[in-house]
Amino acid sequence: MRFTERDGYILEAIHAFDGMLSDFQVMRLLFNPHTGLRQARHRLGLLWQHGYVARPSRRRRASLPCMVYWLDEKGAEYVASLSGQDLREFSWRKPGSRWSLIEHDLIVNDFRIAVMEACGANPELVLEEWIPSSEFWAYPDAVEYDDGSGKKLTRRVRPDAYFVIRGREYRMRLLLELDRGTEDNPRFVRDKVRPGLAYLRSKGYENRFGARSGRILVVTNGNRRMANMKRQAEVAAGDDAKVFYFTTLEAVKPETVLTAPIWYRGGDESPIPLFS
């Protein structure tokens, strides 16, 4: 194969998106959205045949909603070389790692791409920074918080992403929490609401991000579950629930995610946009 400039961009994108992308996501990022899926699959197939990327076996592929790709050793060497690193000191997601989180991570990727496309279509909005979940797993911040009964607990905070969007008049710092309906509401309060509030107020958050403000976006499976989670956050956090914004996976699209009224803020009854 003749290694092209776009092949390099594909490898960089896989690494930047927490080490994994689907063929459809590669198409959205780097190819024509209407005719590029066949081209994307062709290039990914060549990169796979020549050892730049890896993909699951046919047996393991059957359990996934789409084909996914990771960097293989040759691809990791290429991305590492861009910053002058040796492969031995380069941190990258190995093929097949975090298998149980693949579907979760694909949805986080879809959300990120929707935000990127929304900013690309709006000259007043800029995505300044995106920190994926792997950074928080590698270097978590610990917070101490009250569990609601007066007992002090300590928890490591690992959001699904942290990102910053600059608007015309201000920056918005956002923590993403993706909920796929696998946890009951008491666990949501215990594991996300109370630690999340403590984190936004913590010295660790300020030291890490250079700010003391932020909002927590909760994206979940359906309207009923969203309403239950919002109500639980309001009961647990009172007025502080206003830092939580809730929506559904179905509502998140490039044309809605930032500027359409799809977000329900804690304490409010009507949906609002993140940016007016």
Image (cartoon, rainbow, N blue to C red):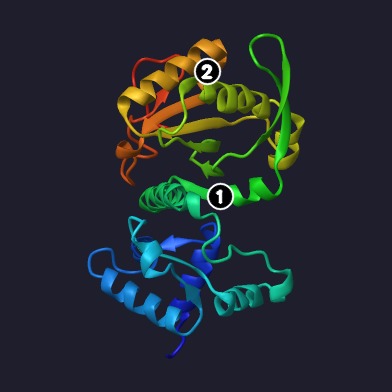
Quarter of the image for residue 37 reads bottom left
Q: Nearer the viewer, residue 169 or 205?
A: 205
On-image quarter of the N terminus: bottom left
Q: Is residue 140 left or right of residue 194?
A: right
Q: Which residue is mark 1?
A: 130
Q: Secondary structure at mark 1?
A: strand
Residue at image coords 57%, 80%: 74
Q: Nearer the viewer, residue 155 or 262?
A: 155
The outermost residue toward the bottom is 1
Query: In the image, is residue 128 above or below residue 77?
Result: above
Q: Amino acid at mark 2?
A: Ala
Q: Secondary structure at mark 2?
A: helix
Residue at image coords 54%, 10%: 238
Q: Which residue is mark 2?
A: 241
Query: In the image, is residue 272 above or below residue 54?
Result: above
Q: Is residue 26 left or right of residue 86?
A: left
Q: Is residue 226 left or right of residue 209?
A: left
Q: Which mark is residue 177?
A: none
Query: In the image, is residue 114 above or below residue 44?
Result: above
Q: Amino acid at mark 1?
A: Trp
Give how far apart the Cα atoms at labels 1 and 2 are.
24 Å
Residue at image coords 39%, 68%: 30
